[in-house]
Amino acid sequence: MAVPEGMEPDESCPACVYDEQFARVVETVTDGILILNDQGVVTYANNNAIHIFAVPRQALVGRSPDDLAWQFYSLEDERLTGSEIPFMQVLREARAISAVEIVLVRPDESRLTLLMNAAPLFDPKRQLEGVVVVLTDITQRKRDEEVRARLAAIVSSSEDAIIGKTVDGIITSWNAGAMHLYGYTAEEVIGHPIDIIIPPEELPAYHALFRRVAHGERVARMETERLRKDGVRIHVSLSLSPIIDARNRIIGISAIGHDITARIQAERALRESEERLRTIFNSVYDAIFLHARDGAIIDVNDRMLAMYGVTREEARRMTIVHDFSSPSNPLDELPSIWSRVIAGQPQFFEWLARRPHTGEEFYVEVYLRAIQLHGQDVIMANVRDISERKRAEDERERLLAELDTTIASITDGVVIANAAGEVIRVNPAAQALLEYTPGAEPTTFAELLGDMTVEMPQSSPFPQEMVPLQRALHGEAMQGSIAVMVTRSGMRRWVSLGAAPIRTTAGEVLGVVGTFTDITEVHDTQEQMEEMLRLISHDLRVPLSVIQGHAQLLKEDLAASAAREEYQAGVFAILRSAQRLNNMIQDLVDVARYEGRRLPLTREAVVLPEYLTRLLRRTGTVLETERIQLDIPDDLPPVWADYDRLERIVINLLSNALKYSDPGTPVTVRAYPHDGEVVMAVTDRGQGIPPDEIPLLFQRYYRARGESRAEGIGLGLYITRLLVEAHGGRIWVESELGKGSTFFFTLPRATAGQEAS
């Protein structure tokens, strides 16, 4: 169906653009319909409106309010100026009016009484663009008050459902239109309540409305739902009016129902279709341009407006070349690109876009293709902002350059390989350590070590499956694996090996990075230091042993001869000081060994409840074991630990707890499993540790402030930390001033195989 004459689009009012579906719907409406733009100029009139005004279409469409003013009068017969016409009030106040009665004097001097309903039209930004006016000719209704004899014939022949009811809602008349609309005959419904055609959920609202009409109110063109005899719901436009007798008494209510089901369904389908299309159009991530074949911009989506910082009206006035493109683009290539698109060849390319108002330029990807839209050939451009991607690519190049420089400058040897074990990078330090010349780097792990000999520190061959690079390929990270390498030139080097997998965010291993640190000089220095410590320890302990031996003999002689107490106390001080000096020497030797990673562990599965009970029984003469309380569950899993090293950890923590808490207060030892480990905790009831001292407790030579009673040189907790970490555990402290402290440490649980062994 072609668009009727007078319904052509009006470019000044985008909200007033009509299509064929709109034409079909509007032309089925029995009312006169006018559409005016924001200046009050008529841009459309349906056939019923032409009939109402009784003028040619061209005499109505395109006319302004002042041109039409001579035709409108108030009910008081006062001629209305252009601004006094009710629909102009809608334009001024942007709100609808309804049921306004007005008189129209037509060119033949005939007069019509019209019921005017008008509503504003808005564009997508809620800007007023016009008004739609619905004119209902109620002249006949007015005459019906004087010519009641004709009413019966009109009612009976009307296609609309006309129903008469008492003020109590009992049906008194039922015309043929009602029978056709609702499916009931007059005999079936007269004398029954009107409720039979009203949906149950509508009854309360209808009864309230019915009462208002029974008191004289009129309801015009109310759209609602009603029930047919067969249960089908239909949409009706309902008008309710009181029936007034000659003595001005309300004796009933008249209801006129017009079937608008087809119109509602058409409007709903059209609205849903347009909303779906517009929603899709505006919800896509890309900016979208719709072009005519000549390149003119027809429409754009919301994403385009946000991306380029323009309004839809501005976008339609602008051009791609002059407004939305950087001058640095190869603009001379656009004609050939456009021709290929029109010929059915989609085009995809990168472009430097430009924001018209700011001049800011940014990179985009453009996908051009020809499509059919509403029967017209249209060129659609999908435009995606790739500025972030470009910046990320530039940043990636910069980071790669920095990484390349960093790897090259690292003094440790670095080797990078892919997931297949193919070597893709060897830095200069690794080339020097492995004695490779630049350009002759290995391509596989097998070539990496070549004919070099790799041994464990005990001179046994280094197992292939223990090589950190190999283990990293299986997802395992390793650090500090010590090996001895005999290079191609015969040099014997001590190295610390490490490797870690390179993973994606999903955890997939992409490759590995391995490190080779030459620790030959460190190893030699540590051996020299250990030798020196052994000599010093021996040279100090020989005279110290002599002092301790003679002091012990002197102590026994003085005790046997009942010598004065001050002599005995002096001898005891000599013995205690000698023992303290011996402990200091042992601490210094142990620290040197631990720091040099010369700390062999002889591990076994240790059952803590039995172990701690025996330990307290053995140390009863040197520790106040009566103050120590054990809180260890019998079913605690065994730990995988060195029996003797664990004893030193526990004794150090218990000694500290007893030393720094008040005499007689208990010290509690707890243990419990947690995340594959066993946590042990030693709690005292002392004065607590200031928060600023806690980070320093496990450092070398640190002694807490105010340790007037403390002995030693501050290595106890430091050695304890080294022993715990050698077991693969952690140690920390929690303390509250005035209440005491708890020292925690973890140990690995023994596996089933370890327990069995």
Image: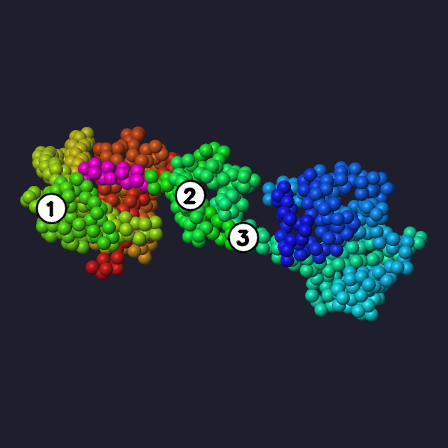
The reply to whether callout 2 and callout 1 are in contact (CB within 8 Å) is no
Q: Residues within 10 Å of mark 1 (few under 14, many from 20)?
A: many
Regarding residue 4, the answer to whether it shows in the image is yes
Type of amino acid at the residue the image marks with label 1: Met
Regarding residue 648, the answer to whether it shows in the image is no
Residue 669, given in percent of the width and then of the height, sits at 32, 47
Q: Is residue 365 magenta?
A: no
Determine which residue is flagged by label 3.
376
Residue 213, given in percent of the width and then of the height, sits at 82, 53
**Labels 2 and 3: the sequence-earlier one:** 2
The reply to whether callout 2 and callout 3 are in contact (CB within 8 Å) is no
The residue that appears at 25% across and 52% down in the rendered structure is 419
Determine which residue is flagged by label 2.
334
Q: CA distance from mark 2 to mark 3?
A: 22 Å
Q: Relative to 127, does residue 170 appear above or below in the rendering?
A: below
Type of amino acid at the residue the image marks with label 2: Leu
Q: Main secondary structure of the magenta part?
A: helix
Which residue occupies the foreground of this view, 258 or 367?
367
Which residue occupies the foreground of this view, 63 or 380?
63
Q: Residues within 10 Å of mark 3 (few under 14, many from 20)?
A: few
**Circle on res. 485:** 1
Q: Residues within 10 Å of mark 2 (few under 14, many from 20)?
A: few
Instruction: Write down the region rendered in magenta.
Output: 396-413
The residue that appears at 73% across and 58% down in the rendered structure is 236
**Labels 2 and 1: the sequence-earlier one:** 2
